[in-house]
Image (cartoon, helix red, strand yellow):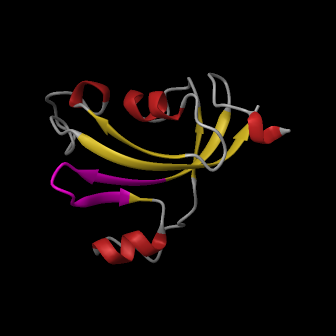
Amino acid sequence: MSQALAVQKGDTVRVHYLGKFQGGKVFDTSLMKEAQKAGLYNPSRDYRPLQVKIGAGQVISGFEEALIGMKVNDEKEVSIPPAKAYGTKGSHPLAGKTLIFKLKLVEIKR
């Protein structure tokens, strides 16, 4: 029955992601193979789905909004403008950038 669940506020979800810039350059991922392909692999990192509590502000707002309504095994690609990512300006290295995320939802806990 849990297959029919769609992500809503308050849920804790686990999601695999691949984050890239508009030009296609990968800047972060939860997938070891993709990290190796992009030259980002870090052996001390644990490549596992990211756990996010929806509504707790643990991730950028555009990422969280993209997860709402997804079901287990859903995949989608979203483009997140700076205003819903790291801001249009500021000290964060990703500020002012539109980010593309490929998401694959692996678990919903309510």
Query: In the drawing, does residue 8 fall left or right of residue 104?
Result: right
State which region is magenta.
17-28
Percent x, y of residue 2: 81, 39
Q: Residue at x 21, y 38 (%)?
A: 98
Please give the name of the residue rendered at 40% of the width and 70% of the height, measured from the top-left corner. Answer: 34
**109 lies left or right of 97:** right
The N terminus lies in quadrant? top right
Decide whether the magenta segment is chiefly helix, strand or loop.
strand
Magenta span includes 26: yes
- Identified at 28% across, 57% down, the residue is 27
Direction from residue 47 to residue 100 in the image, left or right: left
Q: Residue furthest right?
A: 1
Q: Residue at x 30, y 45 (%)?
A: 100
Query: Is 20 left or right of 106, judged from the image as shown?
Result: left
How many numbered discs sit on the rendered protein?
0
The x and y percentages for residue 56 are: 56, 26
Q: Nearer the viewer, residue 36 or 70?
A: 70
Relative to residue 93, is residue 10 depicted above or below? above
Residue 65: x, y in percent?
A: 46, 27
27 in the magenta segment:
yes
> Split into 4 quadrants, where in the image is the C terminus?
top right
